[in-house]
Image (tube, rainbow, N blue to C red):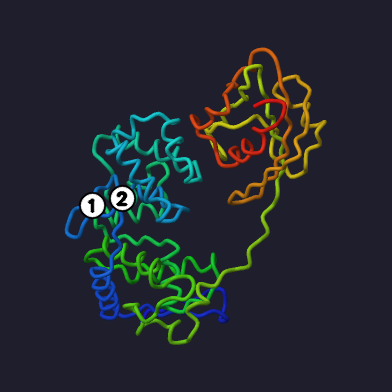
Amino acid sequence: MKRQADRAGPAHQEFAIPAPAARARLAARLLAWYDRHRRDLPWRAPPGAKPDPYRVWLSEIMLQQTTVATVGPYFERFVARWPTVEALAAAETDEVLHAWQGLGYYARARNMLACAKAVAAGGRGFPEDEAGLRALPGIGPYTAAAIAAIAFDRPATAVDGNVERVMARLFAIDRPLPAAKPLLRAAAESLTPPRRPGDYAQAAMDLGATVCTPRRPDCGACPWRDACRARRAGIAESLPARAPRKKKPKRFGTVFWAVDGTGAVLLRRRPEKGLLGGMMEFPSTDWREAPWTDAAAVALAPVAADWSPLPATVHHVFTHFELELGLLAARFDGAPPAGMLPCPPDRFSDYALPTVMKKVAALARDWPGGG
């Protein structure tokens, strides 16, 4: 047997890649299980039908950092509104961002639209191989492998969190994540079969999502229970191991709730690149590591006015940091500054406001001074 060594040292479990006959048996068992227990998902082609690459790609982009239950309704609305990649490519950015509201990680939506435009401009549809797919905006290694396998039945290995968990338990790989990722990928690649790789990729995901769950895995229902080393050792629920989480840094900012004579509130668009790129927001200071004093913030206000602090603070958690926003409110006269848009509060829903700005609106719109 070829052995995959853990180079971090002997304290962690090595795993042995099974012989070809054993790998074929494992794949056959999983595919047989999948044929009986596959999930009925709106983006999946019926058994025996050819998958639509557009639907596969759209679902994989939506499912990044998001659950299947959350994605389902969004996917249905997207394909009803934009049934083909060409239709999506013709959409405006604001339309797509507005339809995306609630899915978070808005860079995915911007990259998705850029990808649709690139595919439509090429006139040949989606590439069938991983290298061609990875050249498109917003498609990384996992997504390229998933599309290649599911849409085009290429022998590609898609390793998401579900698959990592299954591999960690099947081979009892106890090196903590994220250092274990190369080992888990090697394990997954060793089992990917040349026959029905698309069904196999979805089967591995389904197994992790429905049977080999993070807590209380249903080992009795698993087609790989006899081969699972973690089950035999009684450590399945403890895998995959994870390194201790680092505390997220905290950033601070001040938001300006600026109300004109009609009761409209100033909005502006964030830069296209960067966090929440291209989305609408209420004007604010930079988000920095030290809290802002009201005096320092007022010096950066979008308009000259009598600014008053509101007795409320907005807290929001992003992937890499926590954010705390203070609020300053004022009424002002005259035209809005260049690059800013006055919007009545009952029309906020016309724009793609990120969740953190919706929190601001919820706290500030009842300010006695207006809004």
Residue at point 45%, 74% (across, down): 168
> Can you tell which quarter of the image residue 74 is in?
top left
Q: Is residue 297 above or below residue 33?
A: above
Residue at point 69%, 30% (across, down): 256
Query: Amino acid type of disc 2?
Result: Val
Task: Classify residue 254 as left or right of residue 131.
Answer: right
CA distance separating discs 2 and 1: 7 Å
Q: Is residue 174 above or below residue 35?
A: below
Q: Is residue 326 above or below residue 33?
A: above
**Residue 42 percent coordinates (x, y):** 30, 52
Q: How many marks?
A: 2
Provide the secondary structure element on which disc 1 rests.
Answer: loop
Q: Identify the residue position indicated by label 2 in the image.
A: 56
Whether residues under marks 2 and 1 lie with C-beta atoms below 8 angstroms apart, the answer is yes
Q: Identify the residue position indicated by label 1 in the image.
A: 51
> Can you tell which quarter of the image residue 68 is in?
bottom left
**Residue 125 percent coordinates (x, y):** 25, 40
Mark 1, residues whose alpha carbon is within 10 Å: few (<14), some, or many (≥20)?
Answer: some
Query: Amino acid type of disc 1?
Result: Pro
